[in-house]
Amino acid sequence: MHPPDDRYVIYQLFGLLTIHWYAVCILSGAILAAWFGARRAAARGHDPEHAWNILAIGLVTSIACARAWYVAAEWNSFVQRRDNYASAWRWLLFDVANPQTGGIAIQGAIVGAVIGCFIYTRLNKLEFLHWADLGAPCMSIGQAIGRWGNFFNQEAYGRPMDPPQPWGLRIDAPFRIHQFQDLTEYPVETTRFHPTFLYESLWNVLVLLSLLLVERRFRGWLRKGDLLLLYAIFYSIGRLFIEGLRTDSLCTNGIGGECEGALRLAQVTALVTIVLCSGVLALRRLRRPSAPQTAS
């Protein structure tokens, strides 16, 4: 695989409008996820407009939390750039809050999506856990499509394959991290990197199918909120292993890369999520049985 040289759908139309393929992938995934959520809501007798409204709020809270997560992990880097700006507000607006200066974190985006759903359901007197379960498979759709934005940006790739495989990813020299920029050791024409964005995209498709199967086969066993917990567990299992292949991870010492001498923040988060959500799921099973979840 070789990402296209042009990362833009439209570049400076009339000197103003620029649209990135990355943004197209993210928005396409979000819209398809909301469409699927609307169909799931309608099938259960709900107003499908709620799904689209949750998307509108969720996009804002997801982007905000995804950026905040990344900034918190890389805070030292932002502090070092403070002197490049004439005032604190310019630094905060044009560097800290601006995703174009580098990075968002998908685990933060997931937290933001859940927060957005909670806000909307509370404001409209809807049952949060029920709508969270309706939206859990939808998040997998959004991630599966959105991850292809990394392909166009030549980012979120893994270490070089040894030996190269047919599905290996070619990364141009300007987009490589420093340890792979020696073109004598890692020639552009023959070096292939693990397409970790593809692995995660496929894993999210598997998560989607698994959630739908569990929902269908074990409807009488599930309680409200269980599908959201299972989504968090299933996604985190895949992220735990896939993250180990990446070379641009956020690290617990705040320095991106292979995290030598530190832990990968995404893996720590995934492991904690698996343990906590599995514990909550188990405790819910030990409590006095409640009435089976219905389709209402």
Image (cartoon, rainbow, N blue to C red):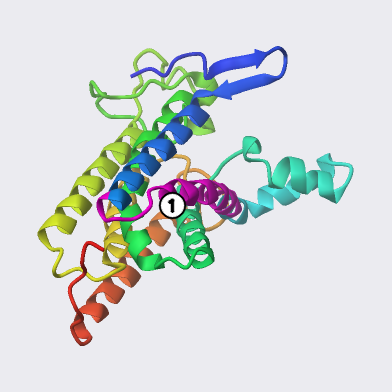
Residue drawn 25% across the image and 50% down it? 43
Is residue 286 highlighted in magenta? no
Part of the protein shown in magenta? 43-68
Query: Can I make out residue 244 in this image?
Result: no
Number of marks: 1
Badge 1 density bin: few <14, some 14–19, many ≥20, Cα 10 Å: many
Residue drawn 23% across the image and 20% down it? 166
Q: Which residue is mark 1?
A: 50
- Label 1 secondary element: helix
Where residue 121 appears, as percent x and y from the top left, is 47, 63
Horizontal placement of 287 versus 103: left or right? left
Residue drawn 25% across the image and 79% down it? 284
Where residue 264 appears, as percent x and y from the top left, is 44, 54
Where residue 254 appears, as percent x and y from the top left, is 57, 53
Q: Amino acid at mark 1?
A: His
Q: Is residue 233 above or below residue 184?
A: below
